[in-house]
Image (tube, rainbow, N blue to C red):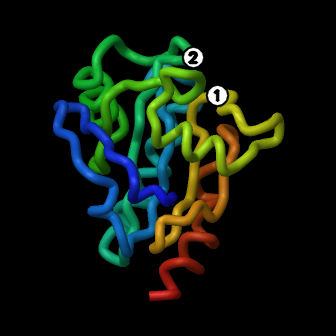
Amino acid sequence: MTIYDYTATLENGETYSMEKYRGKVLVIVNTATKCGLAPQFEDLETIYETYHEKGLEVLGFPSNQFKQELSTSEEAGEACRLTYGVTFPMHEISKVNGDDANPIFSYLVKNTSGVLGSKIKWNFTKFLIDQEGNIVKRYAPKDSPKNMIEDINALLAKN
């Protein structure tokens, strides 16, 4: 299994196959607009703007599992755009842990582990995926998105 075997649903309810990102480098991140780490949206957006034309996609997945997200997917997406200037795709609010977790995050968690085990411990856990859909690295919530730049560049250089 790879990330391409899953579907995702955008904030507006539109569902698509992750297959559409085959050949792209992906950063998948669970987000929350009311989290103290929310300023990371700015760095994620800068990375998206800098590397998008070179083959990078950043995908934001809001989650209220840690009680720091707005009540609807649309509100969360709008807050990201208005407050942080986000232009990368934002998805529907979903859980990232447990039986009801978004299947994408179940897959990511099953195939990686963080400092305290595989479960996602907080908002802004970031996953880097290569052009073949393989998980390359997991970054902790407090890791700055800027810490991913060297790894992103290395993957993009493979094209």
Which residue is pictured at 63% across the width and 64% down the height?
Answer: 136
Label 2 SS? loop
Q: Is residue 10 left or right of residue 27?
A: left
- Residue tagged 2: 66
Residue at the image position 51 percent from the left and 86 percent from the top: 157
Location of mark 1 (residue):
122
Q: Earlier in the sequence, mark 2 or mark 1?
A: 2
The residue positioned 27% from the left and 52% from the top of the image is 17
Residue type at tag 1: Trp
Q: Is residue 152 above or below residue 64?
A: below
**Residue 104 or 120: which is nearer the viewer?**
104
Three-letter residue code for mark 2: Phe
Query: Disc 2 and disc 1: Cα gap in Å?
Result: 7 Å
Under circle 1, the secondary element is: loop
Q: Where is residue 83 shown, x and y percent of the image?
A: 34, 31
**How far from the left and from the top, in percent, is residue 46?**
42, 57
Q: Farthest residue toward the front?
A: 1
CB within 8 Å, label 2 to label 1: yes
